[in-house]
Amino acid sequence: MTKILIVDDHPMFREALHGAVKSALPDAAVFEAGNIEAACEALREKSGIDIVLLDLSLPGTAGFEGLMLLRSSFPRIPIMIVSGLDDPRIVHEAIRLGAAGFVPKSVDKTTLANGLSEVLSGSVFVPAELAQALTAPPSLSETDAIADRVAELTPAQMRVLQFLRHGHLNKQIAHELGVSETTVKAHVSEILRKLNVVSRTQAVIATAQLDFETILGSEPTHHRT
């Protein structure tokens, strides 16, 4: 029996998605959680969950934090994002961070069923229209503008930004760099200001096309004690 966990903070959407999943997989056991904490508890208590359907916008999390937490805590369970956000840059970043699929909340039942089938079979699924957008090259002017803004960051801010791109939380960044969380928060605020974005998620998306491996090396520079 296929076991599916829906993680979304809106009861009405959970109910609608539950119904759509049962329509696609009548014999599936479907569980629900309203936040990341409840999702983790469900995954620990209910053995054999085959797939998680995760909303990105959840209370207590920002950007891709929920995805990263579930990926790090339960790395063997595939996660398909079901989100009201369908910007191709968000889709690209979610897949880069380990999501096994991405479907907008506006998709029809057939597309959702196809997504479930693909992800459960071990593939990565993105609807055709979004997949086409993902392959479109970014505007040269947009990439140049972001690159110019990134060039204004200090070395410390660059390191923090790279940790953000890897999905780290402030506490984790502070530990890795050997600084206080207050210092990290100050760096994040300056990064958002200089990049002209309003959230960590937007900062990650805006810089997704930049080659940070060339700029700073393949991994963030860890603090050495």
Image: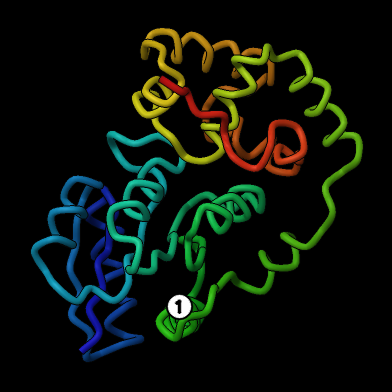
* Residue 97 x, y percent position in the rendering: 52, 52
- What's the residue type where badge 1 is placed? Val
Q: Nearer the viewer, residue 98 or 198?
A: 98
Q: Which residue is mark 1?
A: 119
Q: Nearer the viewer, residue 210 or 199?
A: 210
* Residue 130 x, y percent position in the rendering: 66, 64
Q: Residue 154 falls in which quadrant of the image?
A: top right
Q: Secondary structure at mark 1?
A: helix
The residue shown at (75%, 67%) is 132
Residue projecting furthest to the front = 225
Q: Relative to 203, is 12 on the left or the right?
A: left
Q: Nearer the viewer, residue 37 or 83?
A: 37
Q: Residue 58 falls in which quadrant of the image?
A: top left
Q: Residue 6 falls in which quadrant of the image?
A: bottom left
The residue shown at (84%, 27%) is 145
The residue shown at (59%, 39%) is 219
* Residue 80 x, y percent position in the rendering: 43, 65
The residue shown at (45%, 43%) is 64
Q: Vertically, is 18 above or below 204? A: below
Question: Which quarter shows the C terminus?
Answer: top left
Q: Vertically, is 130 above or below 195? A: below
Q: Nearer the viewer, residue 157 or 193?
A: 157
| Number of residues whose C-alpha sits closer than 10 Å to that of mark 1, classed few (under 14), some (14–19) or many (20 or more) | many
Question: Which quarter shows the N terminus?
Answer: bottom left
